């Protein structure tokens, strides 16, 4: 293009150039005034044409360069398009690319992992990768106390989907789904994390308005009592890094249906949240006469066996109002801090007096995450104290017991968890947790009859005798404590996802309230290994 344009310009200006050459030669020795004037006019015209020629040459050169650049860019774009996958990409926790466009507005990000785990316990709980730190941790009376167990499991493998859309600059919409395979029908329940088949871990929708600082969540998610890493933000909960699916005693949490309202202030340095969450009460109905609450006078209705769409062999408390959680969280620039209040409402029916009884429970909780060494070592601590809060601890101690007249008596308790989490480099995560959950005696004695929880007249005579009478080993748990240490090694992280392996060991001790025959204890060592592949 450049050569062709130059040729055309030269042909057009050739006569003028020839005249210029003639003027340069002394062809006329003494031109008259008229001729000289004419020649000067021609010279000016030639100079103007020469200037136009130079300008045209510059424009042609620029056009030629732009054409070559556009051709090169088009070739590069074509090559990139041929090499690129069908999906577009955004990073997630595994470091891989997994975002899929749906139309022009919504993106879907798949997630989850495949796990193969090995579990060794020094006491036979007959449990999968989720331990039972309370009722299934046997005493010497049980033959299982004297038998270790080993199990392999892939049931903690997880699937998740996140759909996100942004209708305008200030509004964000999202829906999140997460499931694993740890359901246990027909004994599934709603106590802490529902375990129906297939097991639904989380399923919720969110609406966020950045201009209002408003955040709404509706669906099944981690309870608002769960410590967060930042603000009050879904999918940023500070979950222990354990392989054990029941985590650590002292960790406060549930995953249950809820409606949550959150407001952020001061450029998201302060957050306030209010959540209304699905309730469930964990009762204790011990009596030296019989199993209290159903067969003694007065008889009570405080729960019912599962009906349609519930597990038929599980029981469900007769709740009449949601659990309520109010939380304040702060991110001032160093660390994360939380304080919250929990309110609960319990009910039963006295079948003798034909009347309902109600009682309130709840507690105060707090937590903090402190970066001891920036991006290398964090310290965390959290706790909850109150009455009727057993459901919110990993050990699952009871919420309530009953007075001799059938009235509800919430049980006082407290939970505490501390941990150190280290990241020496990008491949390693190290963790150490120490946690405990403790409850108080809540007992009553009328004549020869004993009621409540932890009554000193309950029998523990045979708890240390293998094969002894179970009626002489009431074994009401007073406290459960655990030390846990473990590590994760990310040995591959790249465009094909992430692979990691983990090793964890824990020591757990379970104590019971002193009764007739003393207060024997039991303990358990649990070792777990895990291999996980995160493809997304």
Image (cartoon, rainbow, N blue to C red):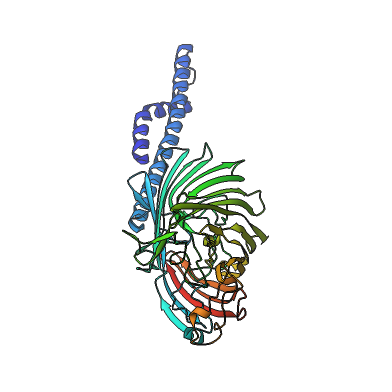
Image-based side of 158 in relation to 131, left or right: left
**Camera sees residue 373:** no
Residue 243, percent across and down?
A: 50, 71
**Is the N terminus in the top left, top right, bottom left or bottom right quadrant?**
top left
Residue 171, percent across and down?
A: 45, 39
Residue 366, percent across and down?
A: 63, 55
Q: Residue furthest front?
A: 447
Report how many numbered discs are placed on residues in the image.
Answer: 0
**Camera sees residue 33:** yes
Image-based side of 104 in relation to 169, left or right: left
Q: Which residue occupies 44% across, 78% down?
A: 126
Residue 360, percent across and down?
A: 55, 52
Q: Is residue 469 above or below residue 80?
A: below
Q: Is residue 59 above or below residue 504?
A: above
Q: Nearer the viewer, residue 17 or 497?
A: 497
Q: Is residue 220 above or below residue 481?
A: above
Q: Quadrant of residue 504?
A: bottom right
């Amino acid at each position: 293009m450049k050569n062709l344009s130059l040729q055309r310009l030269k042909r057009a200006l050739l006569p003028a150039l020839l005249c210029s050459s003639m003027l340069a030669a002394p062809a006329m020795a003494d031109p008259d005034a008229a001729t000289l004037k004419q020649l000067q006019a021609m010279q000016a015209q030639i100079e103007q044409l020469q200037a136009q020629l130079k300008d045209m040459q510059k424009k042609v050169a620029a056009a030629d360069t732009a054409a070559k650049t556009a051709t090169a860019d088009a070739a590069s774009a074509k090559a990139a398009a041929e090499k690129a996958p069908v999906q577009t990409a955004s990073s997630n926790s595994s470091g891989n690319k997994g975002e899929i466009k749906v139309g022009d507005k919504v993106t879907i990000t798949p997630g989850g992992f495949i796990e193969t785990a090995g579990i060794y316990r020094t006491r036979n709980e007959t449990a999968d990768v989720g331990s039972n730190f309370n009722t299934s941790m046997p005493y010497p009376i049980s033959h299982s106390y004297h038998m270790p167990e080993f199990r392999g499991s892939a049931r903690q493998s997880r699937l998740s989907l996140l759909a996100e859309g942004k209708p305008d600059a200030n509004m964000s919409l999202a829906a999140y789904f997460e499931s694993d395979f740890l359901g246990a029908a027909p004994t599934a329940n709603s106590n802490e994390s529902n375990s129906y088949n297939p097991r639904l871990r989380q399923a919720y929708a969110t609406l966020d308005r950045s201009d209002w600082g408003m955040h709404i969540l509706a669906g099944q998610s981690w309870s608002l009592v769960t410590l967060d890493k930042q603000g009050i933000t879904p999918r940023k909960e500070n979950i222990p890094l354990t392989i054990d699916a029941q985590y650590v005693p002292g960790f406060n949490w549930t995953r249950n249906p809820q409606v949550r309202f959150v407001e952020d202030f001061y450029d998201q340095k302060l957050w306030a949240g209010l959540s209304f969450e699905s309730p469930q009460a964990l009762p204790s109905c011990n009596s030296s006469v019989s199993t209290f609450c159903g067969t003694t006078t007065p008889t009570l209705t405080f729960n019912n066996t599962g009906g349609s769409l519930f597990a038929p062999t599980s029981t469900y408390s007769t709740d009449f109002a949601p659990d309520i959680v109010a939380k304040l969280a702060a991110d001032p620039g160093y660390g994360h801090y939380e304080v919250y209040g929990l309110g609960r409402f319990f009910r039963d029916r006295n079948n003798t007096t034909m009347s309902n009884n109600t009682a309130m429970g709840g507690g105060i909780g707090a937590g903090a995450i402190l970066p001891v060494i920036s991006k290398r070592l964090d310290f965390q601590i959290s706790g909850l104290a109150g009455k009727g809060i057993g459901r919110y601890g990993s050990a699952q101690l009871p919420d309530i017991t009953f007075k001799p007249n059938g009235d509800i008596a919430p049980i006082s308790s407290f939970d505490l968890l501390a941990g150190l989490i280290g990241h020496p480099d990008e491949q390693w995560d190290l963790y150490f947790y120490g946690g405990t959950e403790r409850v108080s005696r809540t007992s009553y004695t009328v004549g020869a009859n004993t009621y409540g929880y932890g009554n000193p007249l309950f029998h523990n005579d045979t708890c240390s005798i293998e094969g002894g009478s179970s009626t002489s080993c009431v074994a009401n748990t007073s406290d459960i404590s655990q030390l846990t240490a473990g590590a994760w090694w990310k040995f591959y992280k790249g465009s094909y996802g992430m692979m990691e392996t983990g090793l964890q060991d824990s020591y757990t001790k379970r104590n019971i309230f002193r009764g007739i025959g003393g207060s024997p204890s039991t303990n358990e060592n649990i070792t777990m290994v895990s291999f996980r592949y995160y493809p997304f």
